[in-house]
Amino acid sequence: RAPHPPRSRVMSGQMSREERRRAQELEEARKAGLAPAERDEDGKEINPHIPQFMAAAPWYLEQKKGLKHQKAWNDVDKKEGEGASGSWYKRGVKTFQATKFRKGACENCGAMTHKRKDCVERPRAVSAKKSNADIAPDEFVQEDVRLGFEQKRDRYNGFDASEYSRVVDRFERAEKLKEEAAKKRELEKKFKETREDGAKDDDDADAKNQNSDDDSGDSDSDSELAGDKDAQGFMKVNKRVRTAGGGASMTVRNLRIREDTAKYLRNLDLQSAYYDPKTRSMRENPTPNDHPSDAFVASGEGGSKSSALQKFAGDNVNRGTGDAVGFERLMGHSAAAFDKGQEIHPQAGPSAAELLYKQFREKKSALSQSTKSSILDKYGDASEKTPAPEGLLLGQTEAYSEYDRAGRLLRGAERAAQKSRYEEDVYDQNHTAVWGSFWKGGMWGYKCCRSHQKGSYCTGKKGIAAAEAAGDLMLDNLKRREAARLAEEELNERDDAGDVNAERRGMKNPFGDESKWGEKETTTTDDVALDPQKLMDALRKEDERLKTGEEDDGEKHEKRGEKRNKRGYNADREEAEPTEEEMEAFRMKRKREDDPMAAKDAGTKGYDLV
């Protein structure tokens, strides 16, 4: 396998050192202007200052040095090919018109581009084939116009600029007529002035002055309009015709006042509403995120809310005004009626759809009026009541009252207090005062019995005395509890110091915490003093009893067949009550079945509290 040549030799086209040196010298001479420029395949000169990476063509194109490879290789002819600028359907093109009938032409008109059955001209009384006269010209057969992406969306594609000359001519003729009318009015004005100057009558002079003032005002306004052509038609409203987007057909000054902000300047964000420069329309709202209160601006410096003007919110807002709303409702009603089985269609039968919608509105209005009347008849209408007398409305009355300086009534009747909408002076449950007449401790109540329970039965003075006694008893209980707490604290302090009395000098629990002594079944506050020797004897007896069996004496006698009670009926001996030591031993040695730690499946194998 032969080795690859060096990369430098490949890039240089297998050039030797001498050839490479001569090529470099030639390139420098071309850059200095001493040697003629190199030419490409088309014979065009190549700029020697173009960098190598731009001028060198890829190896797979197999072309010489130049910039031909930089252009679009699939570019078609700009005059007739696809995507050609200005390519459009030709209109009014004249083709060949023969003077005599040709074989294979249309028998009716004589054109070669169609046959008799495809002829759009009316059937002649004498066909062109028989008359051999008035031969129609051949139609221009339009080839398929292939448009690219940009050409399909170009609004001015196919526009003939020469057609605008007719618009200019029409405007110039209108301006000329306006100037002639202004000159005519000026001449009539001067003629009237010269004629009225010769009159000597005062009445005629007064009439002259009055007429001259009126005519001068008209003439001055006409002369101003004639002198300032730019101001003519500035405030005139023209019909929106002859445009695809509904724009005005006149000049730009009729569309926007110079002081107003342009639509495309209201929001400079590129993602905002789209502005169409040809029709000068912006359908969406350019500022949709503004607060609704900012949608109005004052009409002047001293403008108020009433004289406010609404900001521009898009051209689509106009679609919800005028007859558009009624038409939309008509279409909705027709669609709903068609869904319910009515044979109605707004396009096929517009008059029938309009009549049906009118009947529907009349029936709906009558039904709503009858419903409203029935509700008003049942519940009344406060807005249609008979108005109050004027004297009562103005606060005037014939009653006479006198008051002193302190506000006390001296003569006349006391003014009646105005009552509220709620019932007043209602006494329930034998109360003599209303609820809320008493307040104490942040709670409302009845003043007659000082009860804070709403709806309770009144107890009168006895209830007040009982409430006071209950309050005193509560205070006494609090004082006793406080005294007991202080005494307990003092006793604890003395116990800690070692100074205890004989009553509390008993033996403490030898088994530790007092919770092990039992469940505190006694209600006494003092601890029970236990004898340690007696407690040990009791524990020993309890162990013996548990070893022999947990049955009591009654169960043993029943097993032996003996009676439970061997004593006689009139026996004098009595059973001795268990001592405190025996009860404590029983509590310490008894089994606690409800203890989860002593269960069989607990894994603790039981435990002894002692």
Image (tube, grey):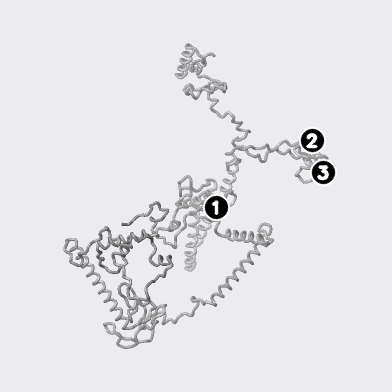
Q: Which residue lies furthest to the top in this view?
A: 18
Distance between mark 1 and mark 2 Cα atoms: 57 Å
Judge whether 238 appears above or below 464 on screen: above
Q: Is residue 234 something one can see in this rendering? A: yes
Q: Type of residue at label 3? A: Val
Residue drawn at point x = 39 percent, y = 71 percent: 565
Q: In the rendered view, does 543 fall on the left or right side of 225? A: left
Numbered circle sitting on residue 577: none
- The residue at which mark 1 appears reads as 178
Q: In the rendered view, does 461 fall on the left or right side of 85? A: left
- The residue at which mark 2 appears reads as 102
- The residue at which mark 3 appears reads as 126
Q: Type of residue at label 2? A: Arg
Q: Type of residue at label 1? A: Lys
Q: Do the residues labelled 3 and 1 touch (CB within 8 Å)?
A: no
Q: In which quarter of the image is the C terminus?
A: bottom left
